[in-house]
Amino acid sequence: MRIFRISFVNHGKIYQLYAKQVRQAEIHGFVEIEGLIFGEPGSLLIDPSEERLKDEFSGVSRTLVPVHAVIRVDEVEKHGSSKILDLDPNAKITPFPSPFSPPRKG
């Protein structure tokens, strides 16, 4: 079975998901992610960010992500724990698209 790790920006955070299928969607400008996989094999620890992702994507058979939000797609040998990561405010390189915040006055 092929397994893909997909990283994309959503609401100012980096989502990292594992799925069975990733392909260009029929809707222009979107990537279709199908067969989401949760839970690291053999793990007894519960990761709160993975539980949040399970809740957010419960009942979802496939999801469409705007192609400009995708950071990378990797084919991996086994799946790990899905995560929600913060964007590093001190990073010299910001993934596109970055959340827009107006400049501060003063």
Image (cartoon, rainbow, N blue to C red):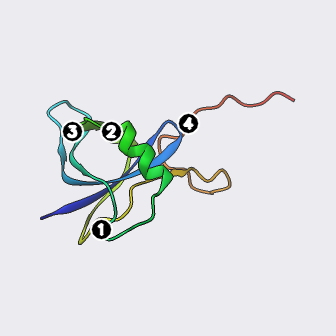
Q: Nearer the viewer, mark 3 or mark 4?
A: 3
Q: Residue 37: x, y in percent?
A: 26, 54
* Depicted 42 relative to depicted 50: above or below: below
Residue 99 in the image, given as x and y percentages of width and height = 56, 36
Query: What's the residue at 63%, 57% (across, down)?
Result: 91
Q: Are marks 4 and 1 in contact (CB under 8 Å)?
A: no
- Residue 39 appears at what percent x and percent y? 33, 59
Identify the residue under disc 3: 62
Give the alpha-carbon distance from disc 3 to disc 1, as whole Å: 22 Å
**Reading the chain from its start, which is encountered first: label 3 or label 4?**
3
Give the mark, 1 or 2, whose residue is nearer the N terminus: 1
Give the residue number, with chain letter if any, for mark 1.
Answer: 41
Q: Which mark is residue 99?
A: 4
Q: Earlier in the sequence, mark 3 or mark 2?
A: 2
- Residue type indicated by callout 1: Pro
Q: Amino acid at mark 2?
A: Phe
Residue sitting at x 51%, y 44%: 13
Task: Name the kind of residue labelled 4 in the image.
Answer: Pro
Instruction: Tell whether label 2 touches label 1 (CB within 8 Å).
Output: no
Q: CA distance from mark 1 to mark 2?
A: 19 Å
Q: Looking at the rendering, which quadrant does residue 106 occupy? A: top right
